[in-house]
């Protein structure tokens, strides 16, 4: 994985882990053992094969993380 991709993943893994936990009932070990392709496949709509909306922006991810921290 390139340094840019590693840095991007380092910035965005917490909300993906949270999403997998809440929507898929995955524990951390299941999240970390899954490949990105497996995570995407698990979150896709089975009828449309899409993830729905476009990927969230960094600003949106930051807002969601802030909201999640404040319960």
Image: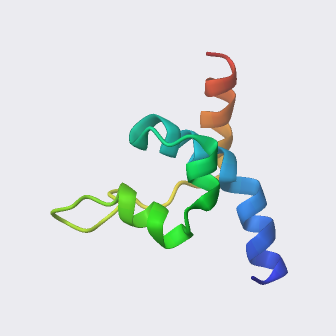
Quarter holding the C terminus?
top right
Report x, y in % for residue 33.
61, 60
Q: How is the image coloured?
A: rainbow
Image-quadrant location for residue 35: bottom right
Q: Nearer the viewer, residue 39 or 50?
A: 39
Q: Residue at x 69, y 23 (%)?
A: 69
Report x, y in % for residue 62.
68, 41
Image-quadrant location for residue 4: bottom right
Residue reaching furthest left? Answer: 47
Residue reaching furthest right? Answer: 3
Residue reaching furthest top? Answer: 71
Q: Residue at x 67, y 53 (%)?
A: 13
Above-or-below relation of 30 to 10: above
Quarter holding the N terminus?
bottom right
Q: Seen in the image, is 32 located left or right of residue 20?
A: right
Above-or-below relation of 28 to 42: above
Work out whether residue 60 can be spotted: no
Q: Residue at x 63, y 44 (%)?
A: 28
Work out whether residue 42 can be spotted: yes
Q: How many marks?
A: 0
Report x, y in % for residue 39.
47, 61
Q: Nearer the viewer, residue 4 or 54?
A: 4
Report x, y in % for residue 36.
55, 68
Image-quadrant location for residue 42: bottom left
């Amino acid at each position: 994985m390139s340094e840019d991709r590693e840095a991007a993943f380092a910035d965005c893994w917490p909300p993906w882990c949270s999403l997998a936990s809440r929507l898929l009932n995955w524990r951390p070990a299941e999240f970390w053992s899954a490949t990105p392709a497996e995570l995407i496949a698990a979150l896709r709509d089975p009828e449309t094969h899409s993830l729905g909306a476009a990927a969230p922006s960094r600003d949106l991810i930051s807002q969601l993380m802030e909201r999640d921290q404040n319960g």
